[in-house]
Amino acid sequence: MKLKIYNWCFLCFMSFVGHCQLTNSAQPLIEKLYKQPDIRHYNRTDFESDTQFWTACEDTLGNMYFGNNDGILIYDGVHWNTVVLPNSSSVRSLVKDANGTIYAGGYNELGIVQKDEYGTYNFKSLKETYKLDNFNFENIWQAHSLNEHLIFRTFTKIFVLYQNNLTQIPANNTFLKSFVTNDSYYVVDADNGIYEVNFKTNHLTQVLAASAYQNESIISIDGSIVKNTIHILTENGQLLQYNLQTHTVTSAKNILPANTSKLISCTNLTPSTLLLGTLRDGAIQLSLNNNNSTRPIQNLQGETVLNLFQTSQNNVWVLLDNGLDFIDFNNPKTTIFTGASVYDIHYINNILYVATNQGVYYSKTNLHQTITPESFKPIIGLDGQAWSLNYVHNTLIVGHDKGLFRIHNGDATKIGNKDSFWKIVPVKEKENYYLACHYSGIYVLHYENGNWNITNKIKGFDESSRDILEAEDPYTFWVCHGYKGVYRITLNSNLERATAIAHFTDSNGLDSPFNINVFKWNNQIVFTTNTGIFNYKKETNSFKPFQALNKIVDTTRNTRKILQENDRTWVIQDDELGYFETFSKTPQIHKDIFSETKGTFNRGMESILPISKKHILIGTHTGLYLYEINENNDLQEIPISISGIQYTAANTTKRIPLAKDSITELPNNTTSIHFEFSVPKMPNSTPNLYSYQLKNIDKSWSNWQSMPFKEYNLLPAGTYTFRVRARNTLGIQTTPASFTFTILPKWYQTKLAFFLYVILGISSLFLVIILVKRKIRRENQKTREHEQKTNRLLQLEVNQLKLENHQRKIQQDNEHLEQDVIKKSKELATYTMMLVNKKNFFTELQIELRELRDTLKTKNSRQKITDIFSKLHQHRIDEEYLKVFEENFETVHQDFFKNLKQTGCNLSVRETRLAAFIKTGLTNKEIAPLLNISVRGVETARYRLRKKLDLRSESSLTDFLNGLTTKETTDDNHE
């Protein structure tokens, strides 16, 4: 008994040590795995255009624009569209302005790329707008956006577009390259050096002479690495640091490995990490903070990189001489090993081992070496099918089709002379003893003094023992056979024979003997089947559903693997990997991120190795992959775009405008409607899934599907709203997009038709009743109809008389009002003319009296004339007469003075009266005596009145004053 306890404690200790070795080894393993980004290839088959690409840019929605020899290619993540320039030239430059407009430059061509209402892209030339029709500027090689300026570089000039004005800056020699960094624009002038452009003065200022960089071709100018310093990279790999304050080159060094071909392009992945495009060596990643270490980007489809473009999601498009490649730095998957089917993984002592169908491979790591697909080497002597890797007693034991092997210092040594072993498992009751699981039975493996020996085969059990797990009872093991069910075998203490074997097939609670596997979860032994998960009840000798797991997994699918690692449980169901949080109150299986591995596992030998909370190694038919798990992805939301809609009616397909304020109406003979959609702004190239719903047809959202389109056929008449959403395998989900449309009904399907159907049915029913009773009701009906007709006629006549009387009264009232207005207008006119005439008379009389007084010589005569002047002065037109005029004027033109005052012009009494006189139609000559001023004074007064009323020169003062009364009349009518 003490021996058993000792053995059990020792095995627990060894298990703990093994776990610690895995944990301690796994942590640095993350640092040793080189995360090679995922590469997606695009060739002529995909975009159906020329394969030589020059430039690229991205719009605000994430759509990509590429310039090649055929024009402009636009890619929304699903569909490719081609836009050809008017002169069919190649496109060398693309740029997005501050408003999101895409500008394109070609040979003697400059314009914008726009999208019509149907979602079709087209090119609008700006040559005529900016008067470039007859100007030969040849190719626009580069285009940049800087502080609302758009800069287009040709060999001979720089065109600067700012606030819709195009300015030209000529070159001293030839403008070869241009760059934007730190809100500055630099241009390389052939043989002269690097210049900075001042857009306020449109002048060039030399920054660095060409001799400072040996007049080599400049690939990059970057000012983001060190403050007040720009880094200048040449085609031969020379990196110069130029201090903008001291105007000196502070350092110059070659950053490329030997024999690297010349550089063509460059982009910054981070301030200290560059991605370089070369002439013959593809793309190279360069780290400036790590002794200028370089790593080639593997698996590009071409070696000549003409340009590089970094997207808003920090991925990179590689523009090749023969195609396009997309480097997905956000992809959770990294390829670790390829070329063979992986069955087991083990990492120990800084060596990663992989058991495959072609043997065992390994990759050593050290301080400066990382694990890449190219770093793996095969272990000599282990060619063929390797099943498992077991690390015990500081020795790696390999289960192989050729037998058991031990690995030491990279060499493989066979243990015994038997072939065909799956793996080994410890016997907890006997220290240093293991069960070697064979294709046909179980052997005993013993370790002693550094030697391994196969001692004997256990008698009484000859079935394949690939899936084996130690039970709770001593010397007892569970063995699951893929086709024969479950065995519970008990061995004697000498491990010579099986003393008891219980065989379970489709009885004792199990539904079927097929596809049963055994695992340990939460310290309980569980059995996975095609119908759920079970555990064994010893007291009833039967299997019962294990609800703790059945409520989490899908019991309709076969769970072939369960692996509990810390507080997370990994499961594989029908070749699909997922995980859930073991101790969560609402556990849910997360599996979308691993969708690409679905169907790639080796059945029964699924190989996964969690190495951290966020990382797991997965072995498949095609190799070994590292997945990084980001649990916050589901919190992100990005838009989805409906990129095209078309419908078919009468065997004719037509497109539908995408942006409409009103609901789109489709004819009643529409047979199908087709929607296309895309998510160009997804942060990586993992597959997208789509779900859609057609309101009034679909009760809920559809299942997630991979096809980026949906078509509905033979929809009945009605109004529908199509909704679509998307998510990728990382769980990033878009906000839904929608489109509402109506299919018009046929004439017999309209509401009016249905209403008529109802009326017709009711009428038919009443008609039957009427036909049955017509002899009885005919006379009564005629009498009632006659009486009703008579009453209606009388009522109509009465109503007609009332209406005529009412209209006659209204007409009389209107005529009375019109006559009253005419009378008052005449009285006002008469009174006004009387005032004018009286004033004229008094004026003429005063003139004649003055002349007479001047001719008189006697004092008495002159005094007599003066007395007459006094009497005339007493009877002149004074304020009393004008007030009477104003009262009469207001009676005719109601609220005229009120409206005039509401203009807010602060008019004087004289100016108000002048406005009234103008309103009555008096001439300047007639107004002059009324205001005691000259005709010239009236003109001056009218001018001042216009200024106060803020009237334009082309506006009529008389029309304005007439409008005041019109406005009041209109307001009264509305009231």
Image: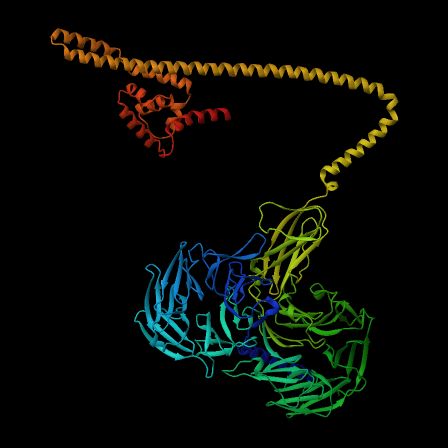
Query: Would residue 813 appear left or right of 225 to someone viewing this image?
Result: right
How far across and how far down the image is residue 221, in percent? 40, 70
Q: Residue at x 85, y 21 (%)?
A: 777
Query: Would residue 947 appear left or right of 778 to someone viewing this image?
Result: left
Q: Residue at x 40, y 28 (%)?
A: 959
Q: Count every numbered label the image shows and give the total.
A: 0
Q: Is residue 884 visible?
A: no
How far across and how far down the image is residue 490, in percent? 78, 81
In this view of the protein, which residue sits in the foreground, 661 or 460? 661
Q: Residue at x 76, y 73 (%)?
A: 516
In this view of the protein, which residue sits in the foreground, 589 or 746? 746
In this view of the protein, which residue sits in the foreground, 234 or 40? 234
Looking at the rendering, which quadrant does residue 200 occupy?
bottom left
Looking at the rendering, which quadrant does residue 618 occupy?
bottom right
Q: Is residue 308 visible?
A: yes
In this view of the protein, which residue sits in the foreground, 499 or 958? 958
Q: For the N terminus, which image quadrant?
A: bottom right
Residue that extends furthest to the left in the rendered view of this protein: 858
166 vs 899: above or below: below
Colour theme: rainbow
How far across and how far down the image is residue 374, in percent? 57, 82
493 vs 880: above or below: below
How far across and how far down the image is residue 508, in percent? 82, 70
